[in-house]
Image: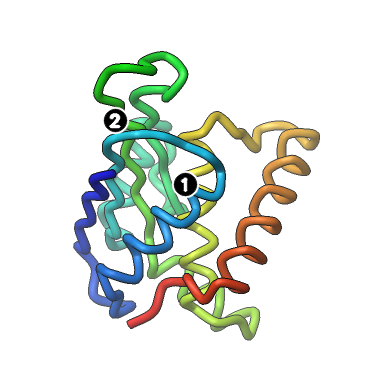
Amino acid sequence: MNIEFTNRQTVLPVSPIALKRLVSTFLNWKGVCCDEVSVHFVDKKEISRLHAEFFNDPSPTDCISFPIDSPTDHPKGYVVLGEVFVCPEVGVEYAIKEGLNPYEEVSLYTIHALLHLLGFDDQTEKDRMVMRGEENSAMHYLKENGVLIHE
């Protein structure tokens, strides 16, 4: 699996190897077979621009996901799962405010974004409950295996 990672932010130093390990471990754990997925870490200005352009909301947000292919739609072809944009600055600010670990928070945002690529949503209360359950299970598994993002 090709995991493309671009880091266009400076607030949180991130190891590209750690990020790719997080993504591949998570997708393998979920049983997802794909050929490519892209993860972009961006600053607040960029995430706000994307949020305004695609969701008509200029406020900064934690992550934005753009699904492309579903692995079940192309079982024998080249599958590009999609692209996710994560804003570590939003995660760091929230982590500081709540006394949390910024790397865990940004790892969670990355998992949240990937879950959107897999078809999970959080628009209704029922969907949010399912999403939170998926996030909690994933974070527990990833922490247990020492695969969270770090410097």
Vertical order, 2 against 125 (above or below):
below
- Residue named by callout 2: 80
- The answer to which of 50 and 38 lies nearer the viewer is 38
Vertical arrangement, residue 73 with respect to residue 129, above or below: above
Residue at 47% x, 37% y is: 32
Which mark is on residue 130? none
Q: Quadrant of the N terminus?
A: top left
Residue type, mark 2 in image: Val
Q: Nearer the viewer, residue 67 or 73?
A: 73
- Quarter of the image for residue 110 reads bottom left
Q: Indicate the secondary structure of the residue bearing disc 1.
A: helix
Q: Alpha-carbon neighbours of circle 1 within 10 Å: few (<14), some, or many (≥20)? A: some
Position of the C terminus by quadrant = bottom left
The residue singled out by tag 1 in the image is: 27
Instruction: Give the answer, above or below, for where 70 lies relative to 140.
Output: above
Q: Which amino acid type corresponds to the residue marked 1 in the rendered image?
A: Leu
